[in-house]
Amino acid sequence: MLLTMYSYSNLCNLQVSMAKQYAIVLFMILVCSKELVQRECYAALIPYINHELTTNHCLEWKCCKHHLCTMHGSSAPTLFFPLHTGGSGYKTLTMINSLAHAYANGFNLGGLLVFPNTLVSHGVNFTRLVGNLFDPELAREILVTPEYNEKEPPEFQLQFKKMHYIVDLKKDGFKVKNAFVYQAPMDINPRDSTFPKQIMQEFHDMFRRSIKSNPIQSLLDNFRGSTVAVHVRRGDMNKKTFEHFIKCSADKHFFKAIKYIRSVIPSADVHVFSSLDNKPHWGSSDFDGFRERNMTVHLDEVSVPQTLQFLALAKVTVVEYMSSFARTAAYLASGCVVNINCGNFKVDMSGATGSFEQDFRMCLQRHTIN
């Protein structure tokens, strides 16, 4: 392996075209997948990284100036991620994770690059969603639209698939000026101890402020007390294509969880949030099982931001973590969070014992039910 690397690094020293050098570097990245030789690979790559590329993308584009993006000062290197093509939940989680990665590794976040056809998914404009849920200024600043040409995409000093490659180069003493990680991150649970607490606290604060200024505040006030909010992902899922997910989030799992919750909180007022998403796979009658068990079902009449607000404000939030939208609501929630987890119920909280019944009662003690 090292001999192969040596031969290719020698080839790079020849006066070959930039395209060939990039092809060689790409090959080296591909063959350097083994953990044991990664650091040798980095060492071999360093001479061929474009040290001279000092383009300040923040002069070309309107980079993020929000205080969450610039927490390391004006002299810090700049990091960019793509805006993910997935749904609202996935986009929100990758936005939070991008800020966390930048902050934890000494970067400012230049922004999330909005490439063609990525801003809107399932009919929801992400700029408006961030403005409604968190902060209009953050919505304006964090989404960066570069002049994009497929044949000549923006160039960066470093471009890697995952963040840890750039972190390791930085640890090895390589002076990073700007970098692009082209795999949108969603690998840190904001509830984990490794997640920068300052970042998540800022999002919680922005979220709470947005609710206070929201025109549905009076409706949200009536939603508190002994309320249980349940997210059931259905509308965008083809019953055949998503067979495994549907089994993990089957109605019976939710029924069982709610039955137990009601045994502990007899006054629980249960609201179920889902969507038909204008698709033919599901109909209102598919939710009759919830209605028959005295649960109020909300389908497309509730907007995406309002659904997240309802879920996050409930005293108990019931979700299936295979849905990134549900995870977003869970991370913003101030009450108890129950993860259906394919029928293996878990309470998402610090100090969990692994016993669902014990953890749920412990959580309720922390969040007193009126």
Image (tube, rainbow, N blue to C red):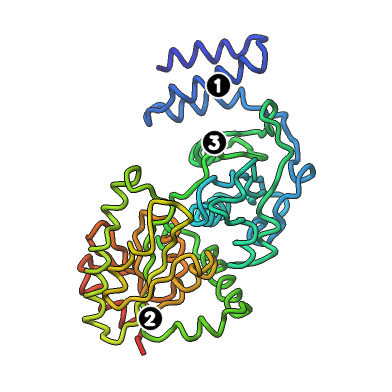
Q: Is residue 331 above or below residue 111?
A: below
Task: Tell me the quarter of the picture where residue 364 sits.
Answer: bottom left
Left or right: 225, with 221 as reference point: left
- Secondary structure under tag 2 reads strand
Dot 1 or dot 3: first in sequence order is: 1
Q: Residue 175, percent across and down?
A: 63, 37
Which residue is identified by label 1? 25
Can you see residue 312?
A: yes
Q: Quadrant of residue 192?
A: bottom left
Q: Which is more N-terminal, label 2 or label 3?
A: 3
Where the C terminus falls, by quadrant? bottom left
Residue at position x 42%, y 77% from top? 314
Considering the numbered disc 1 on the image, is that residue within a helix, a strand or a loop? helix
Depth check, front residue: 220 or 4 = 220
Q: Which residue is mark 2?
A: 227
Q: Is residue 104 visible?
A: no
Q: Residue 213 vs residue 190: left or right?
A: right
Q: Amino acid at mark 1?
A: Val
Local crowd size for mark 1, using a 10 Å CA cut-off: few (<14), some (14–19), many (≥20): many
Counting residues from the N terminus, which is met first, the one under dot 1 or under dot 2? 1
- The residue wearing badge 3 is 169
At label 3, the amino acid type is Leu
Disc 1 to disc 2, C-alpha distance: 56 Å
Residue occupying the point 36% across, 54% down:
322
Camera-nearest residue between 77 and 219: 219
Locate residue 117, reporting x and y percent: 62, 43
